[in-house]
Amino acid sequence: MISENDILETLRSHAGIDAAQTGEAFLRAEIRRAIQACAHPHRLLDPATPEWQSLLEASLVPETWFFRHPEAFEALARWTTQTWHPAHPGACLRVLSLPCATGEEPFSIAICLLAAGLTPDLFNIRAGDLSENSLARARQAIYRRNSFRPGFDAAMWGGYFDDVGDGRRRVAARVRGLVGFECMNLVKPSPPLPRCEVIFCRNALIYFARETQHAVLTNLREALSDDGILFLGPVEPPVALQCGFVATRIPMAFACTKMPGAPPSPDPGLPHAPGPRGRARLPAPPPPKAAPRAVASVPRQPSATTARPPAIHSLESARSLADAGHLSAAADMLEHLAASEQPTAEFFCLHGLVSEALGRGDLAEASYRKALYLDPAHFESLAHLAALLELLGRSPAAAQLRRRANPLYAP
């Protein structure tokens, strides 16, 4: 007779799904439903069976949207046009996005590179996920309002979509043709992950146990070219630094490159990313450059000698300062705004992000909680506070916030 624990172990070993990080009550409830519905429960231990695949689909909760954390896409455009392509004139940039869920991230990458001036022959995007259901939706490329969260600039990006009615948009054919979707296993890739210069693997490691994180980062390191770049989620770089990567020092992009030579052996005593040993400070930013919000404007950005911090006190100006690496100036502007106008959930969320980047964890937590007091469903604050608490070793509280951010996690 198989047990729930047997199935949990199969999900963990094959797909990296860790009950402690994903939500044990949720997973066990799905397993019980699967056992009751399955005439041959032992098939739930075999990843090759439809029964196991169905359980896997129920256990995965894709959470993504267009231009999520736009700083990463802006950094990709700058890195590609100013660093990689000048060193490889005429070469095709190979990009991997996984897990890609329902496709919003790889399509955002394609749009970003087109807007930065690259022609379709200069880049190739492959996107992978374990969920066949998510991949099917990605290939359809039809999205509802939830995929276009606040911050999506319809005036800038709307031309890359077609309105198909009923509040839905479809990615334009000229963009759809630039992304190939396929089933990929990030934990146990077979065949190995494709060789590439850019990898987007964001907000996946936080759901894995420590040993799985190290295995995944080993797979990513083997796939990444020696001069490539890896984009991770906001709290994931610390564990990458244990596994043969170094930080790029690009503000708010959470990107890494490969450490020259052989990767170090991970210290088994180190906590899983990010773990309870305190807040990892971001490296000091490079000399300030102007970093526009619009990826399309990257090729035309002003030189470092002409860049000037915004003079107008506004939330958008503070955001621009933070994106450009002027963290202290952004913090000062936010303090001025707090005294001069009624703060909003968006204000406190940005205040939390800036405080976190400056290493002020207590202040960041307080700011996120103020945002949630004003708007209990504010997704960005829920997600960032969950990540911060996970980094501080407060996993149960972080899991509770993730369930609030995504009700599908609730048992």
Image (cartoon, rainbow, N blue to C red):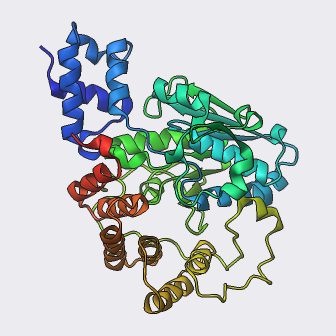
345 versus 407 height, above or below: below
Q: Position of residue 241 (x, y in %)?
A: 47, 57
Does any portion of residue 136 appear in the rendered image?
yes
Relative to 237, residue 343 above or below:
below
The quadrant of the image that shows the N terminus is top left
* Quadrant of res 293: bottom right
Query: Residue 302: where, in percent of width, then height?
Result: 80, 75
Q: Is residue 224 above or below residue 155?
A: above
In the picture, measured across the screen, residue 242 lies left or right of residue 139, that is left
Number of labels in the image equals 0
Residue at image position (60%, 28%) is 140
Compared across the picture, whether 120 is left or right of 409 comes to right
Residues 125 and 274: in front is 125
Q: Foreground: 5 or 170?
A: 170
> Is 326 placed left or right of 172 in the picture?
left
Task: Name the residue furthest front.
Answer: 166
Q: Quadrant of the C terminus?
A: top left
Residue under the point 67% across and 79% down: 288
| Rendered residue at 44%/77% (across/down) | 351
Q: How far across and down, in percent of the image, does residue 191 sit?
A: 55, 23
Tell which residue pokes out farthest to the top in this image: 39
Report the residue at 46% width, 89% height from top.
Answer: 335
Residue 201 at least partly seen: no
